[in-house]
Image (cartoon, helix red, strand yellow):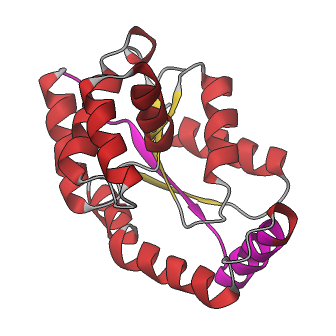
Amino acid sequence: MSARLVLLGPPGAGKGTQALRLAERIGIPAISTGDIFRANIKDGTDLGRQVQEFTSAGALVPDELTDALVRDRLLHDDARDGFLLDGYPRNAAQVAALDAAMAQAGTQLDAAIELTADTDVVVERLLNRAAIEGRADDTEPVIRHRLEVYRAQTAPIANLYAERGLLVRVDGIGEIDEVTERMLTALAEQIG
């Protein structure tokens, strides 16, 4: 199956794990903005140098720069027939930028998958991960704040995709294999 997909979901819902698994099963690249940033910095591209200026200063990379990096990444040969974007778009302006880039390429998004997860389960997952990885600043109040930020900024994107008939919601709680199978089944129903 070839597909052009966006993966949405709150922190701790399992997006990173599921993005890699789903992309491998479908045969498309999983593309995260973090990976794009690191690759461009490592390769010393003009865009990478701009990213490094922001990240070195502890600042967020502006939408315009993120959009340019994603647009450039989608032009690579491995993404010609499909891709799974993990962590992008994060707001309505990035949705518009992605729409424009895809229209320019003569393509369109096939589906937006939203991994859903109960807030208390996600908080528990993230607290466990913080303990294992030694992330002392990932406290429950910090995690709950990140979830609030997600709901305020990123969750409305799900509504945009739902209005377009592209949104597929999948329960992200359960065994990793179960969630992957749920995603594949939901995608098959959505895009055939």
Lateral position of residue 95 relative to residue 31, left or right: left
Compared to 149, does 81 lie above or below?
above
* Horizontal and vertical percent position of residue 111: 41, 42
Q: Is residue 123 magenta?
A: yes
Between 71 and 13, the residue placed more toward the observer is: 71
Q: Does the magenta stretch include residue 121?
A: yes
Which image quadrant for residue 131?
A: bottom right
Residue positioned 43% across, 33% down in the render: 36
Residue 145 placed where, x, y %?
A: 52, 85
- Image location (x, y in percent) of residue 141: 62, 90
Left of 181 or right of it: where is 56?
left
In front of the other: 163 or 83: 83
- Write the residue at 53% across / 78% down: 147
Asked which quadrant contains residue 82, the reply is: top left
**Looking at this rendering, what residue extends furthest in the bottom direction?**
141
Write the residue at 50% across / 30% down. Answer: 192
